[in-house]
């Protein structure tokens, strides 16, 4: 489930993203998983407890993409971002504490026109502190018509050097190094880029390479991790037809508990004409929100 900024859902119609998600998790069929798209920090600051519960649901991936862009508050202000680095850290710290094992992905921009060396050092410190398993490192690019495009740019060689320094730190972080031998449950969804494996994702949307056997595609498997790399794990299959569960080492006593099977809930709820109309209205509202947000962002967003 994604949009230009998923966390902004409902701000124009008096509801929230958790309101929508609590309804969705009721009807996710067994054997399926929901992954949430990107959300900026301000839009979930008031809903962290709810988001922690939803991301702990066994049919929702414990994964969230929350861009930070820079760790310097002065740079964030110049970018016209509506949050501080401390607020970003609050989101990450809360979710990591309440959804143990969660994957937090983020973005950074190197070389924004007003970024000083001291500002950039703050960003490097943030990368080192959190060791994000998924980090998108980008160089500043001026978008025509924005105030940032009229600012004096940092020399290209300095921007490239900053990008290299950030990449060097990231490349030397290995988030999966301690997972060899662990037992995990994965949902197999696609062919790997090497053409020799299928790709499965565990509860935390971490990529696990599975033997390429046709019967595995679309299946939920119990596997043992045999090898890890920077961006993947490789496994041997122990059992087919498992249910997606949170490993015991990641158990969360505060997670929300749903007493009925999702398939049963779907059978009860989906035939309801009233609910169908509500769901259609929700989707249409979401599309309208996304279009409005894109228009506003293209006119006013500064980076």
Image: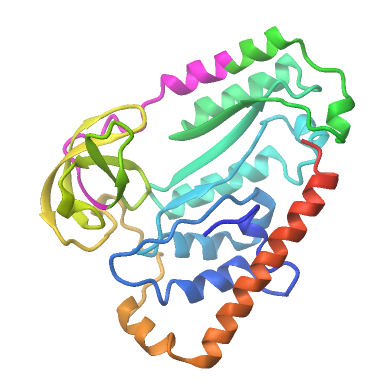
Q: Position of residue 273 (x, y in %)?
A: 51, 92
- Residue 205 falls left or right of residue 146: left
Residue at the top extreme, as displayed: 157
Residue 234 appears in the picture as rendered: yes
Q: Position of residue 213 (x, y in %)?
A: 15, 46
Residue at the bottom extreme, as displayed: 273
- Residue 79 falls left or right of residue 132: right
Residue shown at the point (66%, 31%) measured from the top left: 71
Q: Is residue 180 magenta?
A: yes
Residue shown at the point (76%, 21%) measured from the top left: 115
Residue shown at the point (53%, 66%) measured from the top left: 50
Give the extent of the magenta segment.
164-187
Residue shown at the point (63%, 79%) measured from the top left: 281
Q: Position of residue 75 (x, y in %)?
A: 77, 30
Please tell me whether residue 38 is drawn above or below residue 71 in the rendered image. below
- Residue 76 falls left or right of residue 29: right
The quarter in which the C terminus is drawn is: top right
Between 157 and 42, the residue placed more toward the observer is 157
Q: Is residue 97 magenta?
A: no
Q: Position of residue 94 (x, y in %)?
A: 52, 51
Between 243 and 267, the residue placed more toward the observer is 267
């Amino acid at each position: 489930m994604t949009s230009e900024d998923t966390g902004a859902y409902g701000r124009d119609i008096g509801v929230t993203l958790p309101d929508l998600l609590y309804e969705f998790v009721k009807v996710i069929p067994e054997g399926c998983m929901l992954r949430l798209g990107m959300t900026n920090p301000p839009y979930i600051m008031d809903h962290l407890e709810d988001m922690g519960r939803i991301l702990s649901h066994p049919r929702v991936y414990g994964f969230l993409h929350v861009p930070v862009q820079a760790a310097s508050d002065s740079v964030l202000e110049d970018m016209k971002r509506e949050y501080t680095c401390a607020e970003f850290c609050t989101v990450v710290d809360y979710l990591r504490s309440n959804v143990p094992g969660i994957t937090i992905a983020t973005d950074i921009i190197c070389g924004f026109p007003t970024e000083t060396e001291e500002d950039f050092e703050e960003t490097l410190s943030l990368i080192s502190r959190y060791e994000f398993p998924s980090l998108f490192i980008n160089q500043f690019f001026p978008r025509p018509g924005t105030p940032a495009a009229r600012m004096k740019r940092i020399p290209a060689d300095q921007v490239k050097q900053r990008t290299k320094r950030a990449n060097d730190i990231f490349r030397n972080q290995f988030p999966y190094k301690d997972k060899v031998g662990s037992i995990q449950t994965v949902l197999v969804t696609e062919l790997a880029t090497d053409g020799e494996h299928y790709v499965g994702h565990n509860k935390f949307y971490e990529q696990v390479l599975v033997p390429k056997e046709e019967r595995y595609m679309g299946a939920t498997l119990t596997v043992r991790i045999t090898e890890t790399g920077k961006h993947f794990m490789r496994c041997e299959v122990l059992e087919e037809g498992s249910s997606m569960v949170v490993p015991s080492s990641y158990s969360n006593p505060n997670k929300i508990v749903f007493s009925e099977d999702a398939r049963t809930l779907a059978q009860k709820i989906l035939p309801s004409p009233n609910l169908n109309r509500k769901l259609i209205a929700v989707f249409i509202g979401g599309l309208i929100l996304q279009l409005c947000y894109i228009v506003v962002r293209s006119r006013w967003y500064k980076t």
